[in-house]
């Protein structure tokens, strides 16, 4: 079984807290997430799942795919 671990994502939840753009959310993580814009959008996570569901990952098993722009390695 594979799993995906997302980082900071610009979603509707962020909008409920007056964050109006991905870049605005990213500013909160500028010194924590090295890859700009420092916050992901939902498509970034969807592409990880798409990869795992595709034939390209047919020999990938038991992996923890971290999609956080480098947050966990920083």
Image (cartoon, rainbow, N blue to C red):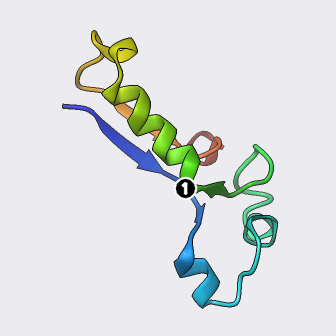
Identity of the residue drawn at 75% across and 80% down = 20
Q: Residue at x 70, y 51 (%)?
A: 33
Residue farthest to the top?
59
- Indicate left or right for 70 with 21 as reference: left
Place of residue 16 in the rendered image (x, y in percent of width and height, measured from the top left): 58, 89
Image quadrant holding the N terminus, namely: top left
Q: Quadrant of residue 59?
A: top left
Query: Where residue 60 appears, x then y in whole percent?
Result: 30, 16
| Residue at image coords 75%, 63% | 26
Is residue 65 visible from the viewing direction of this image? no
Q: Is residue 19 left or right of residue 36?
A: left
In the rendered image of this protein, does residue 6 appear above or below residue 57? below
The image shows residue 29, relative to residue 67, as above or below, that is: below
* Quarter containing the C terminus: top right
Q: Residues within 10 Å of mark 1 (few under 14, many from 20)?
A: few
Q: Which residue is mark 1?
A: 42
55 lies above or below 28 = above
Residue nearest the viewer, comparing 37 with 72: 37
In x, y percent, where is residue 21?
77, 72
Q: Tell me the residue at 75%/70% (across/down).
A: 28
| Residue extending furthest toward the left | 1
Would you say residue 1 is visible in this rendering? yes
Q: Quadrant of residue 9?
A: bottom right
Q: Please count the marks in the image.
A: 1
Nearer the observer, 19 or 72: 19
Q: Position of residue 13 (x, y in %)?
A: 53, 80
| Camera-side residue of 73 and 52 | 52
* Residue 35, quarter of the rendered image: top right
Question: SS of the residue at dot 1?
Answer: helix
């Amino acid at each position: 079984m594979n799993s995906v671990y997302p980082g900071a994502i610009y979603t509707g939840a962020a909008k409920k807290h007056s964050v109006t753009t991905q870049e605005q959310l990213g500013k909160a993580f500028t010194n924590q997430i090295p890859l700009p814009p420092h916050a992901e959008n939902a498509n970034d996570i969807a592409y990880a799942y798409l990869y795992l569901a595709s034939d390209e990952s047919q020999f990938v098993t038991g992996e923890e795919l971290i999609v956080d722009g480098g947050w966990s390695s920083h």
